[in-house]
Amino acid sequence: MDFALTEELAMIRDMAQDFAENELMPLATEHDRNAKIDPSVFAKMGELSLWGLTIPEEFGGVGMNNLALSLVLEEINRACASTGVTLSVHASLVCSPINKWGTDAQKKEWLPKLATGEIIGAYSLTEAVSGSDAAALIATADKDGDEWVLNGTKLFVTTGEQAGLFVIYMRTDQTASKAKGITAFLVPRDTPGFKVGKAEKKTGIRGSSTNELVMDNVRLSADMILGEVNKGFHLAMDTLDGGRIGIASQSLGIGRACLEAAIKYANEREQFGKTIGNFQAIQWKLADMSTQLDASRLMTHKAAWLRDNGLESGRTASQAKLMASKMANFCADECLQIHGGAGYTDDFHVERLFRDARITEIYEGATDVQRIVIARSLLRS
């Protein structure tokens, strides 16, 4: 068992770290306050080929694997979680299923544009009636001759304001059981009848837009179906396995940023004639934060390795997402506590980390859902 990164993986990580520290980190607070990511960030990510990191070289990508993406996402999220989730959704929930399930024509049409960042991808499964119960969605796609007509509203769509292509899950069979009548569609932003609706005002990851989508008689040809008709739910769940590795990686970045901020403050802040890092109470907090962070990283990298090698990764992806998201929130809480009253002000970026961390236990499968997925897998084995 070798825990060392290959030279190529180390280079990719170091490149992402350099970008995150020198160009992204100085803008993170601005992204949060303005509720918008600076367009120059997206352009630079295109220059660095980050948008196409996992897209095959034949379609203009870098051809790297899920472990490489995890390494990059940790570095990006350490600097700015809003930018990090944008990249995670683009790579894990859009590029990955198109590459795995798309037709040759779909790959040739969309992957080169996604690889350069000419268009950014978004994923849409959730509705007002379907959150954790994803199969309960009711937005419809009805066959009309050679076309499909889409109607309904979707919620909580990450990158809705910036995305140029949406992977959207619709009900195509009203008579089938909930999970067996769902189909995935590729919906370009400029499709008539398709509208990006209101933006949500969020507690954290404010730089990342979160929108509703409204479809009013959106007409699509059959070649915009991703995968097979009425088999989209399996596609969605398989895709979310990769997405959960992405959110686990986001959690690593947030947790690491919290630990680093806590160490820095513990070495600077003086009370009772010494720096607070000399007090055992603070030392124990740092020790627990570091231990949970390292354990979460090992679990996340294992999940990525399993997926890269075509092995069953669903349970491990859920375990990684469960462990890492709880770790990120633990580290954020301890970091703010170490900073005391100062951490509760926006003079320090700790309060942003605290707010950003909370969502990791909610989206792409809440903590309780991960426990259900893990338990069902154990009971079947």
Image (cartoon, rainbow, N blue to C red):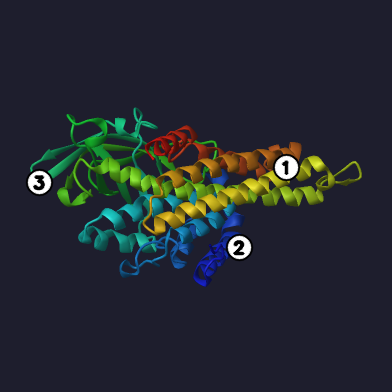
Does residue 88 sit above or below 346 in this rendering? below
- Image position, residue 169 (x, y; %): 28, 41
Label 3 neighbour load within 10 Å: few <14, some 14-19, many 20+: few
Residue named by callout 3:
146
Cα distance, mark 3 to mark 2? 51 Å
Cα distance, mark 2 to mark 1? 29 Å
- Looking at the image, can residue 151 be seen? no
Tell me which corner region of the image, top left, top right, bottom left or bottom right, holds residue 107.
Answer: bottom left
The three-letter code of the residue at mark 2 reads Asn
Query: Looking at the image, which residue is at 54% across and 36% down?
Result: 203
- 3 and 2 marks in contact (CB < 8 Å): no
The three-letter code of the residue at mark 1 reads Lys
Q: Is residue 292 left or right of residue 233?
A: right
SS type, badge 2? helix
The three-letter code of the residue at mark 3 reads Asp
Which residue of the protein is positioned furthest toward the top in this rendering? 129
Q: Is residue 90 left or right of residue 75?
A: left
- Image position, residue 116 (x, y; %): 38, 64
Q: Earlier in the sequence, mark 3 or mark 2?
A: 2
Residue named by callout 1:
285
- 1 and 3 marks in contact (CB < 8 Å): no
> Which marked residue is nearer to the observer: mark 2 or mark 1?
1
Query: Looking at the image, which residue is at 44% across and 38% down?
Result: 374
Query: Looking at the image, which residue is at 46% across and 49% down?
Result: 245
Query: Looking at the image, which residue is at 28% across and 59% down?
Result: 110
Q: Earlier in the sequence, mark 2 or mark 1?
A: 2
> Which marked residue is nearer to the observer: mark 1 or mark 3?
1
Which residue of the protein is positioned furthest toward the bottom in this rendering? 7
Residue named by callout 2:
22
- Image position, residue 120 (x, y; %): 37, 54
Tell me which corner region of the image, top left, top right, bottom left or bottom right, holds residue 25.
Answer: bottom right
Cα distance, mark 1 to mark 3? 62 Å
